[in-house]
Image (tube, helix red, strand yellow):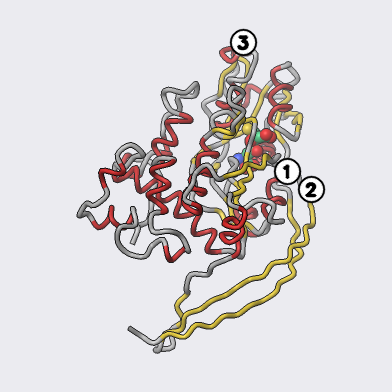
Amino acid sequence: MNKRTTILILALLLLSLVLVACGGGDTQTVEVTRIVEVTRVVDAGGDVAPAPVLGDTLETVRNRGAVKCGGNQSVPGFGYINPDTNEFEGFDIDFCKAVAAAALGDATKFEIRPTTANERFPVLQSGEIDVLIRNTTWTLSRDTNLGADFQPTTFYDGQGMMVRKETGITDLEGLEGGTICVQSGTTTEKNLADVFRARGVEFTPVVFDDADKTREAYDQGQCDGFTTDKSGLVSQQILLAEPDAHVILDETMSKEPLGPLTRHGDNNWGDIVMWTVNCTIQAEELGITSENVDSFLGGEDPVVQNLLGEVGDLGTYMGLNADWCYQVIKQVGNYGEIYDRNLGPDTPFNLARGLNALWTDGGLLYSPPFR
Ligand SMILES: N[C@@H](CCC(=O)N[C@@H](CS)C(=O)NCC(=O)O)C(=O)O
């Protein structure tokens, strides 16, 4: 083993970040004071190897005893409050539970801070939440200018358009001269303008700042079309007065890779969220589920042993228990279980996996190795 020296640099940074609300063009300034800890391990040969940096979010989460996720409350299937149980449920909520299972060993130790599209980035940046898991599209400006780090995409989506069936409209050109309900602070708002301009289709946007108002306005006939991510349309459709009276056009107007975000400056916490998502994907690839995970313990396969923390120090590198990924699988499930529970054939959505299938099944989901 090489002799190693650890250099600890503590820097107090006062950052004044201009947070640009993603679509609406409004700007908000938030003062952020953060202590950044940089730890480097220098080996005897002089090469600098990055060592795990234990940022303060994990510490904060442990002290609080819960992970705080920014989320949705009115998007069935993804993030909503079940009226029967009064509990948050959905695909995004399950990924928040998975982070709690990884970080605290207990998937029930989470809190959801519901956010509008406009306030989601400021609440992440100010430290009010630990992670934002709310159908948020990964874009360059959000990843850089808003001080966020996007973690692996959990849902590959694209923007769609809903119209009333009775109109007989089958494509975007059919909306010429019409009105379109859209939510502010979203990529949706910008894409709508760009795509319609590019096609030379005139329209009038009717803009609201939350999902309920946008859907209700469309339902009451204030708009000819309703646009958001296709997953959002499928979700909102079940809340319309007559869901079957509406159709989502085949056209997809954009790329919307949706996934969790952490703050710039806490790489360790970012790694925890990243590898939590990867853990669910890798488990599905290996056929490990919440039901059968225990039968994989004590096996000989090093790939499984690493994933479940039976050998190696993978958890330690992130400041987690060795069984962090086992807890995610056992308590929340693998990616396919999370998908099916919230969006699969036994739900009102019955969404095909499509791009969200594993790479081995022709989709885009691919976890790097647990080595
Ligand atoms: N993926 C897009 C759109 C995300 C978005 O905010 N969609 C709306 C429409 S379904 C939503 O989730 N609204 C929830 C709410 O306002 O409660 C983005 O990141 O800007």
Ligand 1 closer than 8 Å to label 3 CB: no
Q: For the residue carrying disc 2, how many other residues have a C-alpha within 10 Å: few (<14), some (14-19), or many (20+)?
A: few
Q: Position of residue 221 (x, y in %)?
A: 73, 16
Q: Nearer the viewer, mark 3 or mark 2?
A: 2
Measured in 3D between alpha carbons, the distance from the residue under mark 1 to the one under mark 3, in whole angstroms, is 33 Å
Q: Residue furthest left?
A: 300
Say which residue label 2 marks.
Answer: 26
Label 1 packing within 10 angstroms: few (<14), some (14-19), many (20+) = many
Q: Residue at x 46, y 84 (%)?
A: 42
Q: Residues within 10 Å of mark 3 (few under 14, many from 20)?
A: few
Left or right: residue 16 compared with residue 101: right
Label 1 vs 2, first from the N-terminus: 2
SS class, disc 3: helix
Q: Residue at x 72, y 29 (%)?
A: 202
* For residue 331, above or below residue 343: below
Question: Alpha carbon of mark 3 to alpha carbon of mark 2: how far?
Answer: 37 Å
Q: Secondary structure at mark 1?
A: loop
Q: CA distance from mark 1 to mark 2?
A: 9 Å
Q: Which of the 4 image quarters holds residue 330?
A: top left
| Residue type at tag 1 | Asn
Question: Can the viewer see residue 138?
Answer: yes
- Write down the residue under mark 1: 118
Residue type of the residue flagged with mark 2: Asp
The mark closer to the camera, 1 or 2, is 1
